[in-house]
Amino acid sequence: MMISTRGRYAIRVMLDLAQHQQEGYQPMKEVAGRQGISLKYLEQILPALSRNGLVEGMHGKGGGYRLSRPPEEYTIWEILRLTEPHLAPVACLEEGAPPCNRADHCLTLPLWRELNRRMQEAPVGFEVPDESSGIIAGVLRYINENFNDDISLDSLSEQFFVSKYHLSREFKRLVGTSVYRYIIQKRLIMAKQKMLAGLNPTDVYCNCGFGDYANFYRAFRAEYGISPKEFCTGALRKEGPKPGN
């Protein structure tokens, strides 16, 4: 059995939504950017997950997708069964397969049944069970709580008493992006939320960890393809005129 690209991407998407569960609905474009998956491909995966109740979707301003239940309640099997036509280790255990005439005396059938059972019950594994995962989990918590402060790879290395080279390598391996990009994305997400709440872009950047407006402008435009002011203008247009106007 070989898992398809669609199946691997579906699991990556679910892991991404789990990592950002506390931030609410995640726009498809941001998930695609973090995971390096084309938006067109993602538009085929997320609606399918939504239709089957694995994620919740919301349209409009502040919309996107989020997990429909706690991350630890998911299994690999329920995700992959939506993308893979065949998951059983042998043909006789496929759903709807006719009875095998060797079942009563097959020496390997108990082995395949046990493997099939374990595959169906295997958790998604939102936590990576190795020594580095504990350090990286602490780093992620620290960044999430302090991303508006002056954080760098060097400062994190000192904070957690670990080589910055090791931290950089393990962070990329476990999170799927660099420390720098993760911090920038956290700051940009917060900046968007503040601007949607009505704050002016020139007042937002200093509250989201950007040293000056020029850095904020460049990062925002590079990530979303428009300037912060254009984003605010577009958000106001979507809202339309207020009642009574």
Image (cartoon, rainbow, N blue to C red):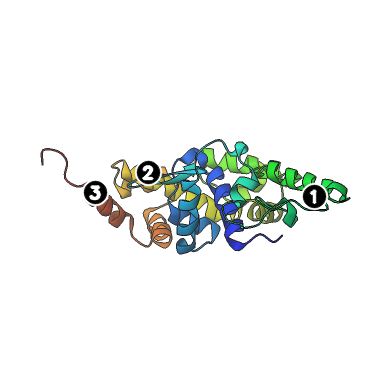
Q: Residues within 10 Å of mark 3 (few under 14, many from 20)?
A: few
Q: Residues within 10 Å of mark 1 (few under 14, many from 20)?
A: some
Residue 197 relative to residue 49: left or right: left
Task: Say which label, 3 or 2, has the lower sequence index.
Answer: 2
Distance from Cα at disc 1 to Cα at disc 3: 58 Å
Mark 3 secondary-structure assignment:
helix
Checking the image for residue 193, the label placed there is 2
Q: Is residue 148 visible?
A: no
Task: State which quarter of the image contains the C terminus.
Answer: top left
Checking the image for residue 112, the label placed there is 1
Is 200 situated above or below 42? above
| Amino acid type indicated by mark 1 | Trp
| Amino acid type indicated by mark 3 | Leu
Task: Say which label, 1 or 3, has the lower sequence index.
Answer: 1
User: Where is residue 124 drawn, in percent x and y?
Assistant: 65, 45
Task: State which quarter of the image contains the N terminus.
Answer: bottom right
Name the residue that disc number 3 marks.
236
